[in-house]
Image (cartoon, rainbow, N blue to C red):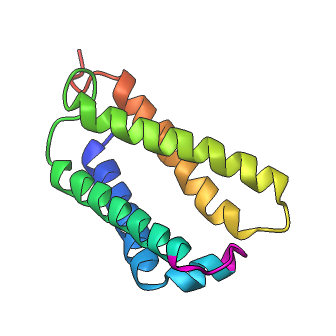
Amino acid sequence: MNSKLLMASSAVFLGAIGVLASFFPQEILALARIEETRISVLLIQMMAALYMAFGMLNWMAKGNIMGGIYYRPVTMGNVIHFGVGGIALVKAALVMPAAAWLWVATIPYSLFAVLFAKVFFTHPVKS
């Protein structure tokens, strides 16, 4: 598994979500059919900051050895983020089948969860 490619692709994915959420919070709320209030816009923008920060963390860590005991906190953070996020998205997508846009986020989230779990449980050096 090429952890550099995984870290770079997850960084771009998270960064893109962060930039979109930062500049288009009203449109995201409308897509999700959530009432636009000052607090809901603020929460979307705060979420955008988290996505951009996590994307930057992954981008800056992409050159390091990942897996096993190496860079365990960064790897575990990604496993938890994508794992819990993927589960939540799958549950939401199954409950709301009319919201097909949920699968656009569910598929990459679930894929990243599986790939980061593989990196976490695999030693980076071949024996």
- Looking at the figure, which quarter contains the C terminus? top left
Q: Is residue 52 above or below residue 60?
A: below
Which secondary structure class fits the magenta region best?
Answer: loop
32 within the magenta span: yes
Residue located at (64% from left, 46% from top): 88
Residue located at (66% from left, 82% from top): 30
- Quarter holding residue 104: bottom right
Query: From the viewer's perspective, is 42 left or right of 35?
Result: left
Horizontal and vertical percent for residue 97?
84, 61
Residue located at (68% from left, 61% from top): 103
18 within the magenta span: no
Horizontal and vertical percent for residue 51?
37, 61
- Quarter holding residue 52: bottom left
Horizontal and vertical percent for residue 76?
35, 32
Q: How many marks?
A: 0
Q: Is residue 44 above or below residue 67?
A: below
Residue located at (58% from left, 85% from top): 27
Nearer to me, 88 or 36:
36
Read off the magenta span.
31-38
Q: Is residue 119 above or below residue 101?
A: above
Q: Is residue 40 above or below residue 6?
A: below
Q: Residue furthest front?
A: 38
Query: From the viewer's perspective, is 32 left or right of 39?
Result: right
